[in-house]
Amino acid sequence: MKGNKAGKKRSNAFCLFLLLCILIILTSGCDRVYKPERPSLEDIEQGSDGLIIEFIEGAPPPDVIEGSLIQAGIIMENKGTSDVKRGYLLLGYEKEYIKLSSWQGKGIDDRITIDIQGKSLALPEGMEDVDIVNLEIMDIGPQREKADTTIYVTVCYDYHTKGHSNVCVDTDVYNLKPREKACNAADVSLSDQGAPVAIKRIESRMIVSKEGGVVRPQFIIHFENVGDGTIIAHGRADIACSAQPLSTDDINVLKVSAVLSDLPLSCKPELLKLRKDSDYTICTLEEGIDETISSYYTPLTITADYGYMQTISKGISIRKIGI
């Protein structure tokens, strides 16, 4: 009997050990198969979108009856890397045909404020927001059977673009030093940085000082509007989404800054007004780099601050009752 009991204990212990092994294998296998890969900062800082705006399908409907109450729904997704803080959404419509009744939870004005987070390591897809507005359809009069009109939605918001690149500070411009150089100054092409304004190209120059002793790194930085909207000056979103007109000085304007490692560059012009959809500014390290230092790679960080404005529209047909 004692032998049987001992055998059962060994058998139970073996079964328990086997079960633990199976659980460990299954758990580790699940980690390998189902554990999602976290995106990197490089993955997030891609794309040419800021806010993406669109109407909810069927809201507003394409055909409506006079005297009815309808809803229009607007979806906004922040697909860029900059947060939208106190941006504006402006509803436009013909008051002859439409009257704004109310926004759901946001009052009765034609304009509402929006705050939508952009992409980040904590929020790799960015944030989405939906706003619903209730609209009254007016009578079109006894002489008409149908009237066509359009609903417009305009969003205006401040945004920024930040680009990074390792560049060569070439202190031996004419290759006169006997030692081998670590690098040569070269132009850099960049992909979009997760914003509707992109830094497309950096031209690198090393300017030899007339006084001697230093080399001044200089970068020609090319920008382009790669989104579907209009660039406006930073801080002018309130005016852009209002009844007040923007001046020509507020259109296509970027405020540019750049840092080489931890050294601020002087950018001229600092307020860059793009010709059509692209232009460049020149950023220089005025204090220069001691030419006795060996050539080296270092990070260049470029920031552009601006506002952005986009508009979408939806046509509707208003019909009389019974037609």
Image: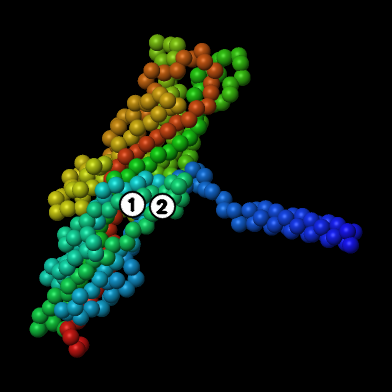
Q: Looking at the picture, does residue 129 appear above or below residue 146?
A: above
Residue 168 lies left or right of residue 226; in this view the side is right
Label 1: few (<14), some or many (≥20) within 10 Å?
many
Q: Position of residue 41 (x, y in %)?
A: 49, 43
The answer to which of 32 and 116 lies nearer the viewer is 32
Q: Position of residue 14 (x, y in %)?
A: 81, 57
The residue drawn where x is 85% and y is 60% is 5
Question: Where is mark 2, residue-wise?
Answer: 126
Residues marked 2 and 1 touching at CB (< 8 Å): yes
Q: Residue furthest bottom?
A: 322
On the question of residue 121 being in view, the answer is yes
Alpha carbon separation for disc pair 2 and 1: 8 Å
Name the kind of residue labelled 1 in the image: Ile
On the question of residue 29 being in view, the answer is no
Circle count? 2
Residue 277 lies left or right of residue 30; in this view the side is left
Question: Where is mark 1, residue-wise?
Answer: 116
The residue drawn where x is 64% and y is 57% is 30
Helix, strand or loop for disc 1: strand
The answer to which of 249 and 107 lies nearer the viewer is 107
